[in-house]
Image: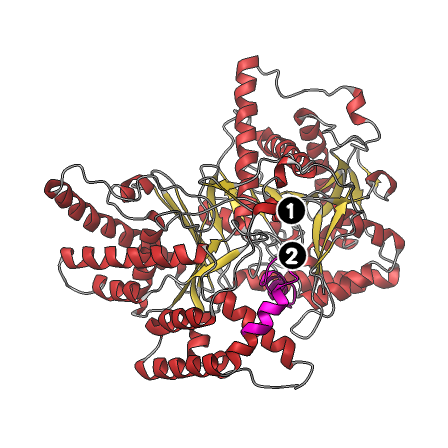
Amino acid sequence: RRSVRQPCRPKASLPRPAMFKHQAELPKLPIPDLDATLDRYVQTVAPLLTPGELAATRAAADEFRREEGPRLQSALQEYAQGRVSYIEDYWYDSYLKSTGSVVLNVNPFFILEDDPTPIPASARQVARAASLVTSMVSFYTQVRGETLEPDSWRGRPMCMHQYRTLFACTRVPSPESGAAGGGDEIVRYEGTRHIVVLAEGLAYYLDVLDADGALCLSEHELAERFRRVLSDAASARAAGGAGEGASASVCVLTSETRPLWAALRADLARTPKNAAMLRVMDSALFVLCLDGAAAADGDAAARAFLHGSYSLDPSQTEQVGSLRNRWYDKLQVIVLADGVAGINFEHSRVDGHTVQRLVSDVFADTIMRFAARITTGGAADGASHPGGLRRLASTEPRRLDWDLSPSATSRFHRSIRVAEVRLADLVCQHDTRALEVTSFGKRAVVACDVSPDAFVQLGIMAAYYELYDQVVSVYEPVQTKTFRHGRTEAARTMTAEAARWCRVWASDVSADAKDAALRAAVRSVVRVVKRAATGEGVDRHLYALYCTWKSRAAPDKAGAEPPSLFRDKGWAALNHTVLSTSNCGNPALRLFGFGPVVADGFGIGYIIKDDSLSFCVASKHRQTQRFLRTLAGTLEAMLEVLRASAKRRRLESPGAGGPYGTYGFFCNSCADEDGVLEASRQASADANGVDARELPGTAIA
């Protein structure tokens, strides 16, 4: 089964455009040596197990090495011969066969730094939205024309494949989702010219590109149209039409479990009008969400971008929060009432560093336009475009009013209400908090000759240990984009040295002993990250072997037991990731976050900047705020220990320099020559002959 359906016409052979000029040079992700992976696996899980459990895990690994392992390794190698990547389809399936809601379980978010353009508060939302849409469309045209400058790291080209499925793309739910089913599909479209705008849960659409693929509206014109959308949505809400017709909240159905959403979607699509409307939603370049409220603080902002806000009306019975104002199957640009903006994206087809390249370029574009306005005295926003740029474009917003027959209206209204209540329950079951450390950042840590990313990783572990007195499984994604169709490998940063560091930090030993333990742990984390960046991790290889076993065993033996390696305590401990972390830093970003992956876990997104650190932590009410405060104090204290030792070292060895002076950061860890770092990049687009002008919709005043 192909995980990505691509209804695209074959193209004539042409010279390779700039975006993919290095693609053919990229090597395939190597399948690691079986013995090396098993040795690393035992080493990785050792800190998580008792001596008895570790002995059993070592025995299971040895048995796998002697018996089923070589056969599965050979089968995996044969499977990979005809594919670009041995893990790609298995990794798609891990997302697309999941039956749970994508909200909190799949979709991450970014919050952008504020736009420096001075704008009156009353116009800030529509102006920011117009600016972002202009820059997003500019980025899309580069992807569509394959002129986007390819990613590279220290002279090494990186894969650009993910950019194909960022715009004009959607996740389509399948009633067969699940381990035994076919799973959801990723569908991308050619020829798309429109975006969808959500306000008060109502959906609107308008063209932003003309027939020649050029932007057909200026920022001023976009802002005026978004203002009309907000006015129309507010009127519809006040008139009661939003709730009564259920149109205002159909969006919330995308938050349901995948099989249920598939059934509801199929029911909706029974009428030609609704089928056409779903096609408008699916094929849109992206969805712009204009929320009706601002966030009171960083915590509230993180929640709004992660899953939408929860708010009840004065009667305390009806949901009026922005969680109704999302279409979770697509890339979403979200702008709050005060102009605070960011991205929420469906994660199965793209990784964080893909979207981070997008938001980085978009933010840079807005800054450049702001600078141009200053230079030209405000004339650079293109207040009006020549009429020719609007050729065959339908630029007036039209509202999508779902066609619900009298017999179906009550049933859909009930389904929508239940979906909203379930989503609200899910939101209420989680606690999301933000922390911004402004007293120090990358520069201060580098000055102590320590990797900033490893420093933060070890701070997270030490803070958790201080609260819970436990060594737990930690996950940090490391990008593998230097390989064709590379995505990520897991860096399991709770090494033996890291576990020892946690215990030393919580004890009453000297500062010198803590410094020595910390630096040893940093070196171990750096080694793990560096291996992961070369595809020599543990998780992806073993997961592919497990999937290979399932594909071979399923047709022959229903209910067959997997090899003992995958039934062992070590395998369970490795995959029970209590601390799911990811580093995604860039000057354009303010916050970044995602949900926990296990019930007793934390989802921890962090950003490392020159002089600050920011964290967004989500959990199922595991004293999230207390954990963040403990983390802040731990990081401050760690830095003091490092500073004292670094000062002493400089006095003893004047002029000595460390390996982290050129540390850089992007999204998700990516080892450099010294083993640290993070990388950003990817994204993509294509679209599928949808002409919004021919589809139904209600014109608005």
- Left or right position of 60 against 259: left
Q: Which stretch is magenta?
A: 73-101
Numbered label attached to residue 552: none
Figure label count: 2
Counting other residues with Cα less than 10 Å from the Cα at mark 1, is it few (<14), some (14-19), or many (20 or more)?
many
Q: Mark 1 points at which residue?
A: 166
Q: Mark 2 points at which residue?
A: 318
Viewer-proximal residue, 148 or 224? 148
Q: What residue type is labelled 2?
A: Glu
Viewer-proximal residue, 503 or 670? 670
Judge whether 254 appears above or below 369 on screen: below
Provide the secondary structure element on which disc 2 rests: loop
Q: Where is residue 376 in the image (x, y as percent from the top left)?
A: 57, 13
The nearer-to-camera label among 2 and 1 is 1
Q: As drawn, which residue projects farthest toward the left?
A: 652
- The answer to whether residue 507 shows anywhere in this view is yes
- Left or right position of 95 against 297: right
Magenta residue check for 79: yes
Q: Where is residue 78 in the image (x, y as percent from the top left)?
A: 62, 69
The residue shown at (82%, 43%) is 689
Magenta residue check for 474: no
Counting other residues with Cα less than 10 Å from the Cα at mark 2, is it few (<14), some (14-19), or many (20 or more)?
some
Asked whether the residues under the numbered discs 2 and 1 touch, taking CB atoms below 8 Å apart as contact, a structural biologist would say: no
- In primary-sequence order, the first of circles 2 and 1 is 1
Q: Which amino acid does label 1 sit on?
A: Leu
Q: Where is residue 530 in the image (x, y as percent from the top left)?
A: 39, 54
- Left or right position of 30 against 436: right
The image quarter containing residue 656 is top left
- Spatial CA span between label 2 and label 1: 34 Å
